[in-house]
Image (spheres, helix red, strand yellow):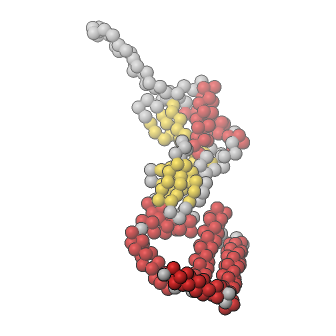
Amino acid sequence: MLEEQLQETVENTNIFIEKLTNPELWINIGWIAVKILLIIILSGIIIRVGKAAIERVFKRRRRTPLQFSERREATLVKLLQNILAYTVYFMAIIMILSALTINVTGILAGAGILGLAVGFGAQNLVKDIIGGFFIIFEDQFSVGDYVAIGQYEGTVEEIGLRTTKILGWTGELYIIQNGNITEVTNYSLHNSVAVVDVLLGYQADLKRVETIIENLLETLPEKYEQIVDKPKIMGVQQLGASEVMLRVIAETLPVQHWFIAREMRKLIKMELDAHQVEVPYQRIVMMTGNEHQPGDHFGDRQGG
């Protein structure tokens, strides 16, 4: 029994050695290795040429009247280059498996069925990817823009095919699925307007106050580069119970209106104080005593 097992082992070893020493086996292995190497080299060449072609197409677009913003162009170039690379890599893997005499048809059929099943279960993922693509393609907003999306407001930190990240001004990082983005307010596309309401008492001389503020506003464009045009006094905005509201506006660079509004409030307050223009404030008049003579009267009610 032991001799038969030993003899069988020797025979199997001889067969294995014969196969290893068979020239046709090594020729086939050599051809397969050459095919795989050629596939890898050609894939690398196609990816490099394709990426260069994509960059060249966008460079030519810069000379045409229809142009993209620099941030949008960089995003689209990177996106298209990644799609090209992933497509070429997938085709290269399929060709390498075919060169290794692996049944690719069965793998593709199984992958198709699996992809269909995953697609039905991942509709939200597909919705997010499509939404992210159109956000980038339509240039709804770019990285660095100040936007408001629903209840979230802040600076766009990152735009992906699935999610968008927004950094709030107090440090919160909001991650929003692109499929849930239905309305966007972009503050960075056009100039902003700073609005300042100045409250004055009814006893104030409006013409004098307007002259004081006008003289101040003329000096602001020289002090602040964020101001695009000379600020203007729009006039009386509201007549309140004890005050008159005077509205002042200034056109600023995008997203600079909050800073300019704060500066204008400070400077207008200081200027009014320098000219002794009193701003309204609530006053309380207290009256004591229950008996009054016919000639008595309550003091004048003083408003702001």
The vertical placement of 161 against 50, above or below, is: above
Relative to 78, is 94 above or below? below
* Residue 264 at x, y percent in the picture: 61, 37
Residue 107 appears left or right of 91: left
Can you tell which quarter of the image residue 213 is in?
Answer: top right
Image position of 287 (left or right of 42): left
User: Is 115 drawn above or below residue 145 in the view shown?
Assistant: below
Q: Quadrant of residue 114?
A: bottom left
Residue depicted at x 44% and y 36%: 239
Q: Name the residue furthest left.
A: 291
**Along the line of sight, the residue nearer the viewer: 279 or 299:** 279
Work out whether residue 46 can be spotted: no
Q: Where is residue 96 in the image (x, y as percent from the top left)?
A: 61, 81
Q: Tell whether 299 sits left or right of 234.
A: left
Residue at image location 57% in from the left, 43% down from the top: 258
The residue closer to the viewer here, 175 or 249, is: 175
Residue plotted at (37% across, 15% down):
286
State whether residue 272 appears in this view.
yes
Q: What x and y, as percent, mark residue 207?
A: 57, 34
Looking at the image, which residue is at 61% across and 51% down?
Answer: 254
Instruction: Count numbered badges in the picture.
Output: 0
| Extreme residue toward the bottom, this view | 24
Q: In this view, does 277 lie above or below 68?
A: above
Q: Position of residue 284 (x, y in %)?
A: 40, 19
* Foreground of the two, 9 or 201: 9
Quadrant in the picture for residue 142:
bottom right
